[in-house]
Amino acid sequence: MAMMKKKFDANRLNLKDEVVSINRVTKVVKGGKNMSFAALVVVGDPGEGVVGYGSGKAKEVPQAIRKGIEAAKKNLVKINLTQTTIPHQVLGRYGAGSVMLKPAPEGTGIIAGKTVRAVMTSAGVQNVLTKSLGSANPHNVIKATFDALIQLRNKAEVAALRGKTVEEL
């Protein structure tokens, strides 16, 4: 089920950025080797439950990070949260990477690997259990995490889909 992406004004939000991975890439050319850097960045506003990711490439690391942040601001998504955790268990898939997200009680914290943790903290989730399955490639793991987050539904949406009231659920 495809969800409509609503555009967010990145300037209104209190965005925090986190660099997930920096990759040094080398291109072999006639004159030798050309080095450049690729940065994978997650930005989000924990108060609003808005998060996005982007990647940037440049000759220097700071420029690559800056480009990644700009790209991430362009694809922000709103996540359905219940207080400090997610409403229900969900499995996100992208390529060979799968990420399982499970709601957790208050005080559990974020049980996640480095890549998924960056997305969860940026989204404002405080208690969640996660498991990354399959691919460990940070790009695929982040995309799988976003696939999972987009699938999250709150009670009102589920009730509307089933044609019932929230009290009937």
Image (cartoon, grey):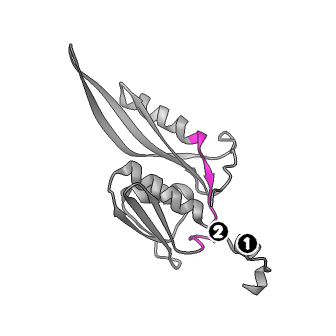
Tags 1 and 2 touching, CB below 8 Å: yes
Counting from the top left corner in percent of width and height, residue 96 is at: 37, 57
Which of discs 1 and 2 lies nearer the camera? The answer is: 1
* Residue topped by disc 2: 153
The residue nearer to you, when weighing 14 against 133, is 133
Counting from the top left corner in percent of width and height, residue 57 is at: 41, 31
* Residue name at image x 60 percent, y 47 percent: 76
Residue found farthest to the front: 1
Note whether residue 58 is visible: yes
The residue nearer to you, when weighing 34 against 84, is 34
| Residue 76 among magenta residues | yes
Label 1 residue SS:
helix
The residue nearer to you, when weighing 15 against 5, is 5
> Does 114 sit left or right of 16 as displayed?
left
> Does 168 sit left or right of 139 as displayed?
right
Position above or below: 136 against 34: below
Label 2 residue SS:
loop
- The stretch in magenta equals 73-87
Counting from the top left corner in percent of width and height, residue 82 is at: 63, 71
Position above or below: 36 against 146: above
Residue 162 appears in which quarter of the rendering? bottom right
In which quadrant of the rendered image does the C terminus lie? Answer: bottom right
Residue 48 appears in which quarter of the rendering? bottom right
| Residue 57 among magenta residues | no
* Residue topped by disc 1: 161
Going by the numbered disc 2, the residue's amino acid type is: Arg
* Residue name at image x 48 percent, y 32 percent: 67
Going by the numbered disc 1, the residue's amino acid type is: Leu
Note whether residue 121 is visible: no
> Does 123 sit left or right of 154 as displayed?
left
Position above or below: 36 against 121: above
Q: CA distance from mark 1 to mark 2?
A: 10 Å
